Amino acid sequence: MRYVELRRHTENDGDRLTPRGVAEAEAIGGLLRPPYAAFVSTGAVRCTEMLKILRAAADQDGVPIVEAIGLRSLVEDRWRDAVKAAGKGADVEAVRDVDPDLVERESLLLGTALRQVVDALPEGGRALVVGHSPTNEAAVLGLTGRAIPPLGKGEGVLLIEDSGTFRLEPLA
């Protein structure tokens, strides 16, 4: 079995965590389940900042933070427009109703990038990934075929892979 804790970054202002976002990340640090074989960021500064806080909380400063830029969409403005059109609190399926091609293509790309994270883990290994919404949700959809509710800032999902089968559990 392999495990991926996939979280959305905490409160931010632009591409930096706010003081509140830092405090929220520190609080999440107390909920972690180390040890981690990998800490993975989309490459956004806010995600890497959060991972540095979480990595320190896990007492694993020696483990590098890896960038998986494939977990970050190249069409973020299109996502924002589609989410806005779908309405507040819309899940990825509601976004699909607004822009089916966006969700179809992006879920495939993002799901493939998430699969690479899973495949790079050793048996029994655990990764902590910090990304964005709704692209985290699209990655899960692309990998597992299942839609998850929208992730609020700091929220996440535990992806458990067992011989190619995936199970999802909410994270606190």
Image (cartoon, grey):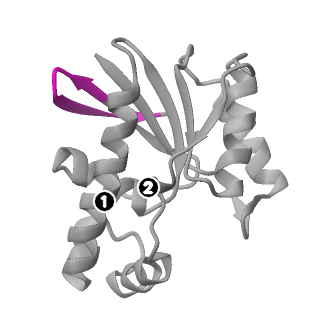
Residue carrying label 2: 70
In contact (CB < 8 Å): disc 2 and disc 1: yes
Q: Which residue appears at 33% of the width and 81% of the height? A: 86
Q: Quadrant of residue 119?
A: top left
Give the Cα separation between the discs numbered 2 and 1. Answer: 7 Å
Residue 142 is a magenta residue: no
Instruction: For mark 1, give the secondary structure.
Output: helix
As drawn, is 144 to the left or to the right of 148?
left
Using the image, determine if residue 133 lies above or below residue 113: below
As drawn, is 109 to the left or to the right of 55?
left
Looking at the picture, how far across and down is residue 96, in whole percent?
A: 22, 75
Residue carrying label 1: 109
Q: Residues within 10 Å of mark 1 (few under 14, many from 20)?
A: many
Instruction: For mark 2, give the secondary structure.
Output: helix
Looking at the picture, how far across and down is residue 99, in whole percent?
A: 25, 83
**Residue 158 seen from this side:** no
